Amino acid sequence: MGLCVKSLFMRQWANWFQTLLAYILKRLLLFIPTLAIIFLVNFAVLEWLPGSPANYVQSVLDESCLDEGLPEVTGQIVVPEELLKELETYYGLNQPRISRFMTMLKKYFFFDLGKSYRTGESVREVIFASLPVTLFVGLFSFLFLYMLAAPIGLLQAYWRGGGWDYLSNAVLLTLYATPVILVAMALLLCFSTGYIVNYFPSSGLTSLGKSLTWWGQIKDYVWHLCLPVCTIVLSALARPVYLMRQAAIAEMEKTYVYSAMTRGLSKSYIFIHHILRNSFIPILGYMPSQLSNMMLERPFFVEIIFSFGGIGSLTLQAFEARDYTMIFGILYVFSLIRVGIQLLGDLIAVAVDPRVHFGKVRR
């Protein structure tokens, strides 16, 4: 009897594992044409924009080029047409667009991101050197966001229609309507310039010229991250709070809540032991997109404002230089991270919510 039960369990586990692998494989196969379309749209946009890497090289030539006999007109260096053609040949820009696009896709399939037009460095190495800062800031902001959003949303639902509900909603809507750059400037003005206090640093990730222990380095790093993380969290707080509030209100209006109240259970007991747990299940479906947003999009402007090296600063430099290889490399890595986060979120939803089964909802 025990052997039959064990055999049945192993067969069910094997079937579940095969279904899991098939689901993951299907999602990855669907991602390939999606990524190709994304690349095609961005490739077309960049091709239509004026300028090229050859023009960038022309714009950064300094006065030393005069020693090579290049003419000077109105204080600017004029690069001969032959040199521009050589630069376009070197970068492969003289090839047909479709040929360049297909070559790029073939290389990216093997994760060969090429070399930067601007610096000549490996795009993959440059991105991986800057990526940890962006991902750490985004992940830290995501965790801090839900540490605030969950209790605020639940308290709004518990005291729905009260003073706390109206006041917190007014503050959140104001933050939601305020651009990220204004939130950052307000925090800098209040906490970094001495207008109110001068406690937090205004730029960078570390203090220069200080010899610190490993624990001191961690505290210094967190100290520098306070204002950037607060900027990201405050600008993104409204949506998860609203979703948490609505999920809790929807649970409060279900039949089992009224049944529990008729049995004499207090509202606070029902809220803590039943509504609180069930309210998190709908939020799980939103968390993957929120996590990718916090890790890949929100830190972009914050990195530039607070001047710490990351993917945001790298992307801005790449666009200024028309560094196509760097732009598409960043887009490719971000797309891989985004699909990985979304896939992980779907698997977590399957594990937490018994009604969901690999992209389908159990009735």
Image (cartoon, rainbow, N blue to C red):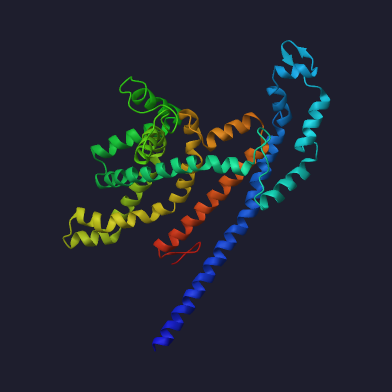
Quarter of the image where one finds residue 233? top left
Camera-side residue of 274 and 349: 349
- Quadrant housing the N terminus: bottom left
On screen, residue 54 above or below 126:
above
Q: Position of residue 151 (x, y in %)?
A: 29, 46
Quarter-of-image position of residue 327: top right
The residue drawn where x is 33% and y is 33% is 171
Picture coordinates of residue 216, whole percent (x, y): 35, 37
Above or below — where is 306 with respect to 258? above
**Residue depicted at x 82% and y 24%:** 81
Q: Is residue 251 above or below residue 312?
A: below
The residue at the point 73 percent across, 10 percent down is 74
Q: Please identify the quadrant where the C terminus is shown.
A: bottom left
Q: Residue lying furthest top in this view?
A: 74
Coordinates of residue 92 in the picture (x, y in percent):
77, 38
15 or 266: nearer the viewer:
15
Side of 181 relative to 216 (left or right): right
Where does residue 219 sit, x and y in percent of width and height? Answer: 35, 37
Whether 59 is drawn above or below 29: the answer is above
Q: Residue furthest bottom?
A: 1
Residue 253 visible somewhere in the drawing:
no
